[in-house]
Amino acid sequence: MDVKLDPSQDDLPLLANTSHILVKHYVLDVDVNFESQDIEGTIVLFFESGNRFKERSRSTEESCQLESRGACKFRTPGPCHIPMTNARTFSSQMGYNDFAICGKGEKDTSDKDGNHDNREQASGISGSKYCRDTGNHGNEDFWLVLDCCDLSVLKVEEVDVAAVPGIETFTRSPKPTVVSEELRNQIVHELVTLPADRWREQLDYYALCSQAPGCGELLFATDTWSLQIRKTGAQTAADFPHAVRIWYKTTPKGKSVIWTSDQSGRPCVYTMGSPINNRALFPCQEPPVAMSTWQATVRAAASFVVLMSGENSAKPTQLREAHSWDLSGQPGNSTNKARCQNQNGCSVDGIMSTNVSAFLREKGYSSWHYYVTMPMPASTFTIAVGAWAEMKPQSCSPNDPAAERVFPASEATFRCAGPCGHMDYPCRFQDASATTQEIISCRIFAPECLTGICQETLLPLISPCLSAAHSILGTHPFSRLDVLIVPANFPSLGMASPHIIFLSQSTLTGGSHLCGTRLCHEIAHAWFGLAIGARDWTEEWLSEGFATHLEDVFWAEAQQLPPTEAQEQQELRACLRWRRLLDEVQNSAEEMQVLRPNKEKTGHVSESGASVVKYGLNPEKIFMQVHYLKGYFLLRFLAKRLGEETYFSFLRKFVHTFHGQLILSQDFLQMLLENIPEEKRLELSVENIFRDWLESSGIPKPLQRERQAGAECGLARQVSAEVKKWIRVNRRPRKRKRRENEEVFEKLLPDQLVLLLEQLLDQKTLHPRTLQNLQRTYCLEQQDAEVRHRWCELIVKHKYREAYRTVEKFLQEDQAMGIYLYGELMVSEDARQQQLARTCFELTKGKMDGASAKVVAEMLF
């Protein structure tokens, strides 16, 4: 397909200078305002600088400068105030091509380990003609650069962590008499490097430090993609303040969160997996290498529930006075200890002044507190606020004996044997009780109107799917899980983040199959995508390919299928995915079909750490499945080569070795090949796999050979027989004299129905009576969304007007899957179908996510 891509519009810039300085912890303290549709408050960032940047002077060739200094306006320190909603953000109004962090040459960051998100790191920026040098150049100040977009930044200040009572614990002298920048940075260094067994104390001190007074405002500037901060006289990352507070608020149109209504008509807001990740939610370092922990206090009206990526199952605290919250979410008195006056006499208590606190009490606000101790990229942070109703499966209680299973001695030893390879944090893989926990604690949330169908469809699946995942991969990386049914405008069927899964309402109807498979897919991301993340965001297959391959295995185990039946169902799903892959490569740009587009430069970044995500902003990318499908077929190919039992034994070993870390494709492939006996390896090598599977567009040659040689599975043959029956029915005249030769149709599984309808789509003409018969035979309008989607395609192709209402309903209620149908309606060149598409778009575009709305608008107008 001849599609022209524009790197200036399609590539996502990651500008944070992570090679110089890294965020180790975030403390958010924010209010969610539904009337103004913004999130406002403060974020405190705790940094650690790299050893190679502590020298005050070093030679460098990184000499790029911003071409027009006048383009950026700098905020200078002014009188202290509590930021109000009408505060002005000073910005340069430049696109990322006009301002980029760059360096000469590439810097491999393979020494940085950690954990990840569903998206992965990028290629390097090198030789850009527009760039700011963020390193040290003699008398020039060091610049901290954060990824930031669509945020109103109101104030930036250094935090006086030395003012916290008891902080002398983290200084070399018991009673420091002189408070210097070096002392404050030493305190932060000691705090961020506390050993894992002191995590509770660490979180307490993070909270106290985040509420300490400011000790000087910092200069800052913003542009389209970043926030740049400097302190006069701080010439290196080591000199720069290591605790910084930013006062900011989001904008209603910011692309990281979406403000909408749930299915019950109540307002809600949630992070919807935007291509720009969280940079429009808070200033952050987006590259996965910036592994950090976080804690957050979120206030919202008392009628709302706040869900977030957090290890604790937070409960609301009714606001009575300005105070802080301890780890369990209960009021504490630490704020009174940390409460102090800043240099201008303003009282500072996190974000809250006395008048703001009084306002919150009058409005009936509640506070929610979450935290994580496992370092992960900031892009994995997820939040959802709405009037959700809670449901909890009985067997998801952490105290339930059924949640644990005694393993044979050899298996139990393997699951917690040997040290972990990641940075220090409280790791479940080293907790013997965690390794035997089949079912982690789980809560289910949904709009009130969907609680009934959730209890019927979703709740019975939670425990068997969690247990199945544990039986295949072992220790659950996360201690608990929330599952939320998100609003209808959610642009996909599901999304996984630490401790929380979003599911589309489209998964709930038509039985348990679609819900179960999607739930298994998102559960699989706990291991591949979160506990083990890709270090390069372009290697998305390391997340999605694994989750797609594992969802079939988990789902078969959850259903407790006999091996032969499980194999048959997995072969049928491979058949369906093969058809989708063929369609995908015929209808997408070749450049976007490559799983490792940066080739030998994969994982490289510029000297500062800045990079770009190739095609990261292309609106069509979020609808593509090539990383899912080609990744799935590669893993399936490798599993067959090793044998299923050997492959999954290896996979458990791989998880134990690499959990908590970022990887590249070669890390997985090299370890896999080392575990393949020589006689099975044949011509397999990392280089050959790169060439055939990861670095070429189109269908991989080994996959073509396999599909051409392979026989059709039994379930697919049954479908082929049913298709022939329908073709005979369609050819018969309307009126028949004899009825003794009526066709008898077999009952089909959901995946068989999908295949049946896809094969019938290949027929040039199906009569209305045949379509009517088809619907009655299989009750198509009561099937799951995958089946109904194919049924709608048949309706559109054959202009079956009696069922147009079904298409309208699908486009409005199944927005996660309906984008393709808009295109089908328009290419038909049928005036009634085109009007149907435009009418449905007018009804839904106000609530549709921006990327989807843009793609549909381009189809329609």
Image: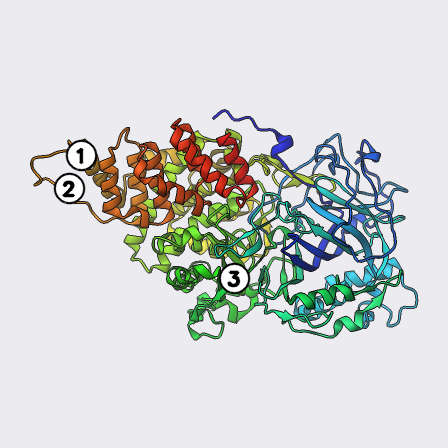
Q: Is residue 540 visible?
A: yes
Earlier in the chain: of badge 1 and badge 3, it is 3
Quadrant of residue 315 within the rendered picture: bottom right
Question: How far apart are the alpha carbons under marks 2 and 1?
Answer: 9 Å
Q: Which mark is residue 743?
A: 2
Give the residue at mark 1.
Answer: 728
Q: Is residue 594 visible?
A: no
Earlier in the chain: of badge 2 and badge 1, it is 1
Quadrant of residue 539 within the rendered picture: top right
The percent coordinates of residue 687 (x first, y second) are: 52, 36
Residues at circles 2 and 1 in contact by the CB criterion of under 8 Å: yes
x 59%, y 60%: residue: 308
Q: Residue furthest right?
A: 177
Earlier in the chain: of badge 2 and badge 3, it is 3
SS state under label 1: helix
Residue 485 left/right relative to 600: left
Pick whichever, 87 or 249, lies toward us: 87
- Crowding around mark 1 (Cα neighbors within 10 Å: few <14, some 14 to 19, many 20+) is few
Amino acid type at mark 1: Arg
Pick whichever, 181 or 675, lies toward us: 181
The percent coordinates of residue 293 (x first, y second) are: 66, 59
Give the residue at mark 3.
Answer: 388
